[in-house]
Amino acid sequence: MPQREEQSRAGSPGTDSAVEPEPRGRVALVTLGCARNDVDSEELAGRLAAEGWDVAGGDDGSADVVLVNTCTFVEQAKKDSVDAVLAAGGPDSKVVAVGCMAERYGAELAEALPEASAVLGFDHYGSISERLDDVMSGRPLASHQPADRRTLLPLSPVKRPEAVREGSIPGHEWLPEIPRRRLDDAPVAPLKLASGCDRRCAFCAIPSFRGAFVSRAPEDVVAEAAWLADHGVAEVTLVSENSTSYGKDIDARGAAGGALERLLGSLAEVPGLRRVRVSYLQPAEVRPPLLAAIARTPGIADYFDLSFQHASGPLLRRMRRFGSRESFLSLCAEIRALAPEAGIRSNVIVGFPGETEEDLAELEAFLSEAELDAVGVFGYSDEDGTEAADLPDKVDPAEVAARVERITSLVEVVSADRAARRVGTEVEVLVERQELSEEAEAEFDDPPISETGDVDLAELGLTEDDVPEMTDLPDDEAEGPVELVDSEPGDLVWIGRAAHQGPDVDGECLLTGDDELLAGLTRGAVVRAVVTGSTGVDLVAEVLDVIAPGPGTAEAPEPAVAGAR
């Protein structure tokens, strides 16, 4: 499960209602962790907006309440979550911790963080508006008491759909009258496929606080995808703890019954969606029909996010996982036989208790042979309540760090080489944003601000009264994003991602080409381009033509490059 840095989101409207309820207060959401948390935050935002709260993505210090959606994936994520709670809000703001860390530690976290006005678990999400009323009114609110959420649902997967109707599972509460409220306006959004996990990996605590595996109803997933497309989303990424298990609880034949394959076909037909991406595939559960559906269904990215975690068979058994170097290489070969240019990314853990030099060499051999497009490398650390925390033969933390550096150096070379071999190939790129070109950025920051000392006003014949305060800007100028204006050709460049590049972690494409063609691009458009260069995992690609215009664009411009379709 790849981790990314904390990121604030700029608010955007998403709740459709004929009658606006009376404002109850202003609430800001700060989201940490993975894309699953992003979905949970937008569901919370939708609920709150429908109940009359003024909702903002990101914290500028002005909110009455700041909801911090925490992460507990690894030790650094916990520290980041605590720091975010401590930094949240202004002098008069109430701060409420929600999310995975709040669910996992509950009252213990509340005791350690008296700065938080409340610590709420997942079961509070359905009544989040009332709970924030309690916080605003100063009414006592008992902190969440953690429990193993795996025990809340039947052991038999097929009995779970009925059981969850009376419960609360974040990201599953798709209600047309209370939709998600988007907290940014990016053309890409995560879409929750399922929650929880039935696997028992020795190093992972997630099932204990996310619970047993539960699929969302396919009609709900499709309806939410259509809503996202109506709100400017061109690509959705299906997220869960284990996407390959989808359908095991809603199809009598289990996951092998093809529920995910059928769902992908339905999602590919949603008007306005240009690309559907599947994430979090469990190698031991991947099956040939699913590989074929991802590789060959138009509109589905030929992208395989496979959590190998290691490649040494004996160490994988110790992790309570399946597979080996040979079986994983065979799986990669099967994928590339279906789609030679498919993207394959993974995560690996080094320094697991008992890992030997032979185990590490086996991992190195696999990574060298597999030629993956992107790999996240994590050093093992004990997690409370996991089997691995009690295992003997712990690797010294300094040695774990050294192994992380060793494997990271290898995958950087392998992934860069894989990207370099894409030069000359055609890719379909989803256009995501504009930013200053390197040349323009260097010109605007020359000399760099960091190297500029204090200005001596006396030398310039000025006093402090001659210099306006930056805070004197009108309110409508002091806040909000700065609009980039392409005053000179080439000052701004378009950035996007090809099908083999997942959001945030797998590199991106810098687009070049005919100035007129580039000037007509908009966010959310899909272009055909030829790769002309690479730097690490990032590509440079020359746009040939526009395959699909961005949302709200009447039609794509005519091809402006010789030989374009």
Image: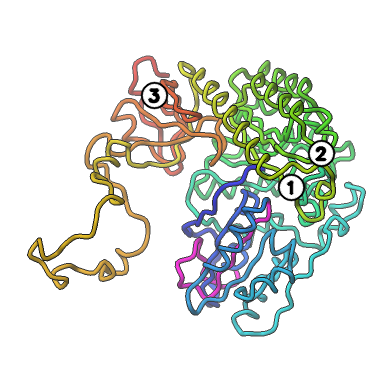
Q: Is residue 196 left or right of residue 451?
A: right
Q: Is residue 24 left or right of residue 201?
A: left
Q: Nearer the viewer, residue 319 or 275?
A: 319
Q: Earlier in the sequence, mark 3 or mark 1?
A: 1
How far across and how far down the image is residue 43, in percent? 63, 59
| 512 drawn magenta | no
On the question of residue 272 being in view, the answer is no
Q: Which residues make up the magenta segment?
A: 50-73
Q: Nearer the viewer, residue 1 or 108?
A: 108
Which quadrant of the figure contains the C terminus? top left
Which quadrant of the figure contains the N terminus? top right
Q: Is residue 30 above or below residue 496?
A: below
Q: Amino acid at mark 3?
A: Glu
How far across and how far down the image is residue 330, in percent? 75, 19
SS label for mark 2? loop
Residue drawn at 59 percent across, 81 percent down: 136
Q: Is residue 428 above or below residue 396?
A: above
Question: Label 3 belongs to which residue?
Answer: 542
Question: Label 2 belongs to which residue?
Answer: 319
Q: Amino acid at mark 2?
A: Met
Quadrant position of residue 280: top right
Q: Is residue 150 left or right of residue 262?
A: right
User: Callout 3 environment at 10 Å: few (<14), some (14 to 19), or many (20+)?
Assistant: many
Question: Label 1 belongs to which residue?
Answer: 194
How far across and how far down the image is residue 161, in percent? 84, 52
